[in-house]
Image (cartoon, rainbow, N blue to C red):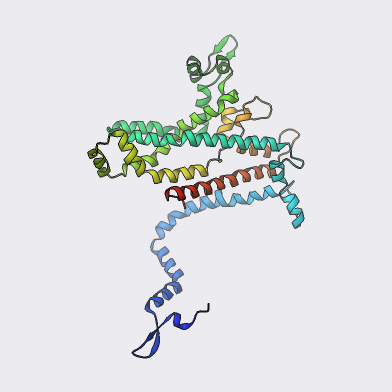
Amino acid sequence: MRANGTDYLIYDQENGIYREDPEQAVRDDVEKHYWLNVLRAIIKDWRLYLMLVPMLLVFLLWRYLPMYELLRAFKVDGSEAQSVSEWAYKGFSNFRALLIGTGTNAALSQEFWMSLRNTFLLSFYGLCFGFPMPIILALFFNEIRSNAARSVLQVMTYLPKFMSTVIMTSLVVMLVKGATTAGKLAAPPGVISQLLVNMGLVSETAANAGLLRSADYFRAIYQVSGIWETAGYDSIVFFAAIIAISPTSYEAAQIDGAGKWAQMRYVVLPSILSTIVIMLITRIGSMLSIGYEKVILLTNNLEKGKGDVLTTAQVVSTFAWQTSQASGSSKGLPGIASAAEMINNVVGMLLVIGANTIARKASNVSLY
């Protein structure tokens, strides 16, 4: 349908002429001077925009520029495909080698699927057991009436987050280490290992050998240490949402005869539901983003053939790091490593989209 002049003009019956609609004139003026108004707003609030520069630089240098290295995933031996047919065969050879086990690097497929499975399981267990803990801590802090006691407890729970990964993993290794013998002196297992043996949860043989050397205990140790490290710091968001609840909501619940548990169920949790949903979506988005630092520091034996702990400890990031490094007679495979990380990130992106869609349809609360 073609537009004509009468769609934008008003007929003036007194003068018998067409004149421009005042509202349309305002819209035309706004559109005409849009960028000028934007420039004026930036000049007016230049201090606020100046504060954005460091964040933009961080995103540019550490988020966007590294994407260029993803081209390695589509290269074999550092060479690019020259034609469309060659691209279809050669450009995706790294992905085929990992997913279905074809080509010269087909042997890595089984190890990649094991790493992807371990990554998902560690993230899933962290979501099931680690995500509720900050909410529980925030509810606990809200019930403490003494500001001094609450401050001390909060600082104690926040402190592990501000320690480096090396320090935290070193403490964990010391607590669950095995028995050692140096000459005539014998050192007993770690304190946590002895406690678990006395409680009957762990055999004495496993404790003496070292819990981190066993594939059966690695996931549990990883999750407990993760909760210890991050639960207190992550509770800040939920505690801030709780203290923002109006006191009148509690008073109304008390008038209706609600006790502490009823107030948590019918007042606190519904009030912070939107915060919980948003944090859950962001947590799902980083489900498969398990860094290699903590895993390597906890096991310290990620080389092939050193114990069965790799069956549960090897994740995609350690697989990519190990594959990209040259060792002995074998050369590094940066293309395979980049392809593994890209597959991992694509799966994480799909999880975010799915979680956001489900949350929007179920509770009308979503990240975007």
Q: Residue furthest left?
A: 255
Q: Residue at x 40, y 32 (%)?
A: 157
**Residue 304 seen from this side:** yes
Q: Residue at x 55, y 25 (%)?
A: 217
342 horizontally vs 29: left or right: right
- Residue 351, image x, y percentages: 54, 45
- Residue 344, image x, y percentages: 60, 43
Q: Residue furthest top?
A: 184
- Residue 349, image x, y percentages: 56, 47
Q: For this rendering, which residue is in front, 148 or 95?
A: 95
Q: For this rendering, which residue is in front, 346 or 153?
A: 346
- Residue 284, image x, y percentages: 51, 42
Q: Is residue 67 above or below residue 254?
A: below
67 horizontally vs 109: left or right: left
**Residue 163 seen from this side:** no
Q: Is residue 32 above or below residue 266?
A: below
Q: Which quarter of the picture shows residue 50?
A: bottom left
Q: How many marks?
A: 0
